Amino acid sequence: MIDHKTILDKHDIIFWDFDETLVNGVNSELYQNYIKDNSHKTHYIITFRTKYQSLPIYDILNMDKVIGKENINGLFSAPESIYMSKMMLPELFQQLDHKKKNLKNEISDNLIRYNISWEEFYEAYDIICRWKPTICSKYGKTILVDDLDYMVEDDCNRLGIEYLNSSKKSI
């Protein structure tokens, strides 16, 4: 287990993923309370949801009655091109164990099944993986809290952004 609060305390600007991080995640309550208790910090939400899909985000946050729009300094929604790249990859690709040794074989089998070329796959995957860390770098270069380590961690490291895996339970 990791002490998320200690890691977050080192940063003045924090980028939060929404789904499975701020809501419906193992640490969502901790994160929402952290935002409420640290209003002096800058808190951004960054999501693969499009602008239209992001409309209910603040209403969803208000349902937990811990934080709301007044606690968040900004919302970054995925441009349509990012969203379309993500949707081009069947949900199956997004659920693969990206640490597996035979991952390439599993991906190959599914590319054939869905009639997607390796070039199309890599292009879409690259676009998706770079988007969140690039936004973080542009607007603060600090920390990204997200559950999709296989999609964002490498580019966070490349850009000098600390990555905190929200799917790992905090102590």
Image: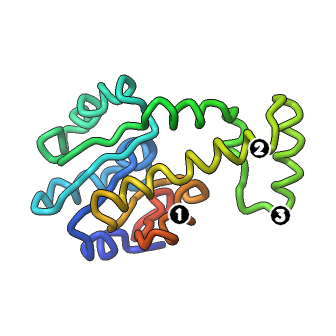
What residue sits 42% from the left and 37% below the top?
78
Percent x, y for residue 151? 58, 54
Q: Estimate the x, y position of residue 38 in percent, counting from the top left.
A: 15, 62
Amino acid at dot 2: Glu
Tell me if 53 is positioned left or right of 96 in this view: left
* Viewport quadrant of the C terminus: bottom left
Please state which of the two labelled residues, at mark 3 or mark 2, is closer to the viewer: 2
Q: Nearer the viewer, residue 158 or 61?
A: 158
**Residue tagged 3:** 101
- The residue drawn where x is 89% and y is 41% is 109
Q: Which mark is residue 155?
A: 1
SS of the residue under disc 2: helix
Q: Quadrant of residue 7?
A: bottom left
Residue 170 vertical position relative to residue 150 in the rendered view, above or below: below
Distance between the alpha carbons at the discs numbered 2 and 1: 20 Å
Question: Three-letter amino acid code at disc 1?
Answer: Asp
* Mark 3 in CB contact with mark 2 (< 8 angstroms): no
Cα gap from disc 3 to disc 2, whole angstroms: 21 Å
At mark 3, the secondary structure is: loop
Amino acid type of disc 3? Lys
Query: If you read the primary sequence from the N terminus, does the residue marked by circle 3 or circle 2 appear first?
Result: 3
Q: Earlier in the sequence, mark 3 or mark 1?
A: 3
Separation of marks 3 and 1 at Cα, in angstroms: 21 Å
The residue at which mark 2 appears reads as 119
